[in-house]
Amino acid sequence: MGCENNTVDLQEVEDASRLKRNSINTRDSHPQRPKVEGWKTFAQDTTLHGARFFSTDNVFRRFVWIAAVSGCAFFCIYQVYSFLGHYYERPFGTTITVDIRDDNTDLPFPAVTLCNFNALDKRRYINYYLTHNYSKEILDKKLQDLVLMIRRSKAVSTEEVRNRTPELFYRPEVGDETEMSQWMFGHQIERMLLPNSPRFSSCSINGLQCNEDNFTSSLSAVGFKCYTFNSAEEGGLLLKASLAGRLSGLSLRLNIERDSYITNLLSPAVGIVILIHDQKIYPPVEEFGIAIQPGMSTFCAIKRRKVRKTDRQRVRYQADQLTSQPASVKFGTSQERTECEKECREPCEHVEYRTSFSYSGLQKDAYIEHFMSILNDNATSAMELEMYRPLLNMTEEEKEKFIDKNIISLDIFFEDLSVEIIEQKPVFEIWALTVPSEDFGIFFTLIVETAALNRNVKTILTEYSNILIERNSFSITMGYENNTVNIQEEEDATRLQRNSISSRDLHPQRQEVEGWKTFAQDTTLHGARFFSTDNVFRRLVWIVAVSGCTVFCIHQVYNFVGHYYERPFGTKITVDIGDDNTDLPFPAVTLCNLNALDKRRYINYYVTHNYSKEILDKKLQDLALMIRRSKEVSTEEVRNRTPELFHRPEVGDETEMSQWMFGHQIERMLLPNSPHFSSCSINGLQCNADNFTSSLSALMGFKCYTFNSAEEGTPLLKTSSAGRLSGLSLRLNIERDSYITNLLSPSVGIIILIHDQKTYSPVEEFGIAIQPGMSTFCAIKRRKVRKTDRQRIRKQADQPTSQPVGG
């Protein structure tokens, strides 16, 4: 065939043919690219950055890229190894948060376990065997054997002792402790609690009276007979506290029965040991208990703390699992108990209580008066008469010694109703190894994605090539009709130049799909383009996969939004170290004498008004009834005789009230000064009564004095350095002889509260007791607390928690 002047330029045909033969990949479309196989083919096709240069003809470039990629690969392996090692070290962090309870939320009161330091009550032991007609000689020998047993002497193991005192070696096989000597002859809680009267309660909680029925008994590991208050065992009611402070706490007045002690050189202690713990915790009181000595009034402020731990072996225990068996469970042998304690591991969550103690003296005359009234009461039980009848034959000095040796006053109360939460959290869990949000997850994900992309790219390119072959099959028809050439390849090549190489654009049915299929093809949602594929199995798999991911995403968003509305917060503790030339404001110090009215001032006042001694004695009796809150004070006779006790100023002027008029004066409490002695000093400079402002406490009516209150235009004192020489020194006289007998608060000394000038001082509720006859050192540290409440309402940092003292 031929045609003069009718030649056909077939350059377009050659371009279309080349597009058919070559791959869509831009690297493969190079006209000079040789056929690559094996490793070179993988290097050309993989998405690993720089791998395609491994087969370049430039030796230097090839060496540089091999070194770079190999270094990155080794670094990646090292990072994976390091993170795996770090993960298996089980690292964790600790967070501290404070859960502030609502006003109407009660806080469970803890269990209080107490044990007398004396294992066996000698008086009960003697009385028991006297009723069994034992001679005094045999009884003395049995007491000697008892002392040898308590001292753990080898002499107790002789056959003679075993025959004479077999009860010391008795161990019940079924774990019944009630037949053991410690159980039979241990101190009884009903004898340890002082006798009650209408004006005196030896046990009270939340202002309500309690008794021995509120205690459960058990034996400690070393043989003490112990009693637990509020154990909530055997269906008992769990007591709760609705308010913080002494008046809503537990008050105990105990007699340790010092004359019944067995001589014990292994534990030569006198008093009781207490442990404050959660009801679910076994109380190892003899190991971790706090000793309370007789002859003192002890104040114990507690704070609830919840501890959540993470176990290094990732073994999660239930929150209510006990560290050991409860005190009520009886064990047959000591070996069984030891094995049980080894098997029962520490739980991942438990509750503990932080304690702080302060001490004051006892009003011995108040207790003596109470015992005398009990002995003269016909309703007194035979047991109480037996215990306290010897007081009738004692002198006043001997009675005071009896109080010092036997009586314990113990008050346990919440310092506030917030809960301190200490939580250990793992640095990362197992899922952190695969998510991109963690360091190791980044490397792991990149490796997986690289491998997946490499395979997917090859698969997609293969499919695209097949599509191109099917769509671009052509035939060349050349003829002389109208001197034209019908070239299908030219149209295909032109369309390929106009359109994208994307697989979605190469689909043969693309131009005919509209609506949902068009959206599925055009959307960037991964996998949605397969919703309209002809392969039913592939379509089903991708629909399930994308739907599952969508549901999971919605679930995650829901969780995060819910977590946000829970108002979570973290606690950050920082230390602001002041400059050397920066002075720190010294706190306000409020102190109150534990005696509400100064008896000496009261008497002197009415003596100057020519009251007879008879009337004055009756007025003092009325005053004592008022302080004791007795109902007898409400009679008309008392109101007429002592009207000042009932005077309440209408305009809030406290200066006319009895507590204000006859309360202790700070001028009299401060010791007299001399050239070598100062009763009040701050920063090495002398201070005096003018540095104190007076007020009345809200609950008990104490007349209190606040040092450095910065009220009424007085300057705020500051300290320039730490240490005793730059602090406040006070030398006080509590005027013990001026105390009014008060069984409601039979304490001696002062109570102090250290607080900010803008904070109201509930000193009688949260103050620290200071007893006379001692030198007390109090080291303080300033702490600034910034809280965020649940409604995200930010309170100003200088807003007081209540009205200031002068308000």
Image: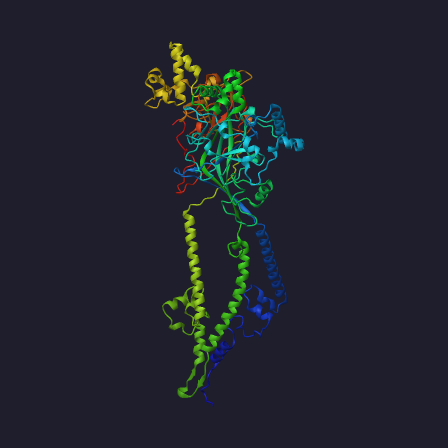
Vertically, is 677 above or below 359? Answer: above
| Rendering coords of residue 103 (x, y %) | 39, 37
Q: How many marks?
A: 0
Residue extending farthest to the front is: 133
Q: Is residue 583 visible?
A: no
Q: Is residue 657 visible?
A: yes
The type of colouring in the image is rainbow
In the picture, residue 791 is in which quadrant? top left
Residue 622 located left or right of residue 423? left
Nearest the eye: 43 or 482: 43
Q: Say which quadrant the C terminus sits in.
A: top left
Is residue 179 found left or right of 764 in the rendered image? Answer: right
Q: Nearer the viewer, residue 545 or 369?
A: 369
Residue 569 image-quadrant placement: top left
Residue positioned 62% across, 66% down in the render = 62
Snapshot quadrant of residue 548:
bottom left
On the image, the x and y values in percent for residue 452 come to 52, 65
Q: Position of residue 517 (x, y in %)?
A: 39, 68
Using the image, determine if residue 633 lies above or below residue 74.
above
* In the image, farthest residue toward the bottom: 1
Q: Residue drawn 58% across and 28% down?
A: 269
**Which residue is more in the foreground, 183 or 419?**
183
